[in-house]
Image (spheres, helix red, strand yellow):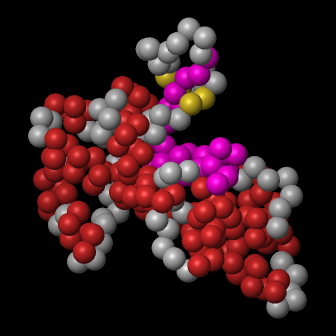
Amino acid sequence: LSKTFQKLGYDLDRVRSGETAVPRLFLVRLPGDIVNIREVAVRKSLFFKTMLPLVLQANEEILQDRRRLWFIQYQTNLGKKPEPEDRLWLIGLMERYGLKKASISTLLERVDVIPPSMALAQAAKESGWGTSRFVREGNAAFGQWTYSENDSLLPSRRDQDKQHRIRAFSNLLDSVRAYAHNLNTHRAYKKLRRDRKALRQKGEPLNGLLLVEN
């Protein structure tokens, strides 16, 4: 995998400086032998290079919905009623984001991207840089809890009074999608969404370090 990244010219320093784009290379899972890499810097680099394209893809999917929302809002502000297909799409979007009834502005607060720096930091922490059993066996990069026995893993050190399990995924991208959806819908992250909206209104970039405190 490291050799493949090198052939593609995938260098994180060059990505940060804007010299090169992130290649759209989507891994189904992390390499099984990542736990054997002794050089910490090498393991961290490999982990970030694997996860970054997935985070960007999940954000791009969210942005597609956000752009459509903006267009519908623009048309509405001009006094035009949404087309029938747009009304059906809005109903489906509200259901997907856990809202029974909502304005477009309310939807825009939820349908927004997660700063890549924030997603990568949380994935690294929750998965032990790709070495945890949950990410190796279930592509659970973020250690999301579930109470369903389907598509889940049982924590080996779970307290006796706990009933949770760790949600498992068929691929890493679905894990990233679920993580973003959780932040965009769960009531525990309401302040994060409000702060993100405030940054948008000020025209400021989404600061992952600031938002992660929520």
Say whether residue 175 is left or right of residue 28: right
Q: Is residue 177 visible?
A: no
Say whether residue 111 is left or right of residue 8: right
Residue 77 placement: quadrant = bottom right
Give the answer, above or below, for where 153 lies relative to 187.
above
Q: Residue at x 25, y 75 (%)?
A: 17
Q: Residue at x 59, y 16 (%)?
A: 162
**Residue 178 pos. (x, y %):** 56, 45
Relative depth, front residue between 182 and 170: 182
Q: Residue at x 59, y 22 (%)?
A: 164
**Residue 114 pos. (x, y %):** 51, 59
Give the answer, above or below, for where 25 lies relative to 76.
above
Q: Residue furthest bottom?
A: 78
Relative depth, front residue between 35 and 208: 208
Residue 71 placement: quadrant = bottom right
Q: Residue at x 43, y 58 (%)?
A: 209
Q: Is residue 137 visible?
A: yes
Give the answer, above or below, for where 66 lies relative to 165.
below
Relative depth, front residue between 47 and 213: 213
Say whether residue 70 is left or right of residue 2: right
Relative depth, front residue between 84 and 130: 130
Residue 102 placement: quadrant = bottom right
Tag count: 0
Helix, strand or loop for the magenta stretch, by majority: helix
Say whether residue 141 is left or right of residue 110: left
Q: Which residues are magenta?
A: 163-191
